[in-house]
Amino acid sequence: MRGILQSKSSKCWGLLVSTVLVVILIGCSIVYGLTEIGWAVAYEAFTNFNGSNEHIIVHQNRLPRALIAAAVGASLAVAGALLQGITRNPLASPSMFGINAGAGFAIVVAVSLFSITSLTAFTWIAFLGAALTACVVYILGSAGRDGLTPIKLTLAGAAMAALFASLTQGLLVLNERALEEVLFWLAGSVEGRKLEALTAVLPYMAGGWAGAMLMAPKMNVLHLGDDVAQGLGQRVWLVKGMAIIIVVLLAGGSVAVAGPIVFIGLVIPHIARGLVGVDYRWLLPYCALLGAMLLLVADIAARYVIMPREVPVGVMTAFIGAPFLIYLARKGVR
């Protein structure tokens, strides 16, 4: 599959334009919302902080929110591209892999059984739940004489996602207090998150980004098929295992800081492939930038739908992703 941008120069220009758009959208995220800040005031908040209400909003709310949205969007998109690559399933995404459901279940257990309410604690508990879920899915997908296969990995992820979703609903039915405390988090949101929540998982995200880029040449070989990759001397099981570890770092960290935001890992890799093709050396950077752009746009739009209240950004991405999922499903059937 060849993308719209075929020459190296056009792809480089596309990366530059996408980077500029991400910066502009971060600025828009800082400026626009219930409290209109203004570009000049936002600039002064960084160059001449005076402690005014607008400057405090910029530093304590808008800037962390924008940075978290960009980091989470980039991480989920890259994780989705890797999952679709190792499973060869165009519908694969972190939510399908069971990471979102595992992290959500861990949070509900913490609130229901241990009365934990700290957002910082939520971050680490969700990260742990996501990591454990991915490990279980990998083990289940590797069981048997034929080892790790795309169909087994996909089925294992879908089974774990369904299991944890059912257990989560059961616990919430039995504990209304837990439902009230985690409902907004379960919908996926970057509103009200502090910069400390991002810095806690940023090293893992950064490691995932770097690891994904180092894996890009190996993913290109794997894209040719397991048999061809083995014939070229690649240890397919090791490449897939490393890719899953990177997915855990990226998707687990994203779920930990922003909740289970869906569809970015599904939609963005397809858009990126339409632009630059299947070369992972270009595909992954484009996924990161486009994922950041999508979540920033969704977060800005979420502030205006039912103003003065806000829609969780996970709901906005679902509105975008659901029609795309239907399109992919119908295309696959045809």
Image (spheres, rainbow, N blue to C red):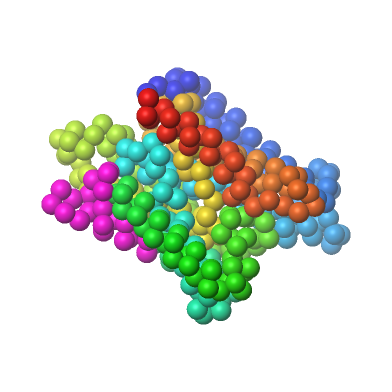
**Residue range (magenta):** 132-152
Left/right of residue 257 with respect to residue 28 in the rendered view:
left
Quarter of the rendering containing residue 207: bottom left
Number of numbered tags placed on the structure image: 0
Q: Is residue 210 visible?
A: no
Q: Nearer the viewer, residue 226 or 175?
A: 175
Vertical side of 295 occupied by 164: above or below? below
Above or below, 122 relative to 275: below
| Residue at left offset 32%, top offset 56% | 137
Q: Residue at x 86, y 59 (%)?
A: 52
Q: Position of residue 236 (x, y in %)?
A: 22, 44
Query: Residue 310: within the magenta?
Result: no
Residue depicted at 46% across the width and 53% down the height = 251
Q: Is 263 situated left or right of 334 in this image? A: right
Where is residue 308 shown, x and y percent of the image?
A: 80, 52
Quadrant for the C terminus in the image = top left
Residue 113 position (above or below residue 124): below
Label the magenta part by its dominant secondary structure.
helix
Quarter of the figure with residue 230: top left
* Foreground residue among 84 and 70: 84
Residue 182 in view, yes or no: yes
For the view shown, which residue lies furthest in the bottom direction? 114
Q: Which is more toward the observer, 323 or 302?
A: 323
Rendered residue at 44%/61% (across/down): 166
Q: Is residue 152 left or right of residue 212?
A: left
Picture coordinates of residue 110 (x, y %)? 50, 74
- Horizontal and vertical percent for residue 270? 45, 32
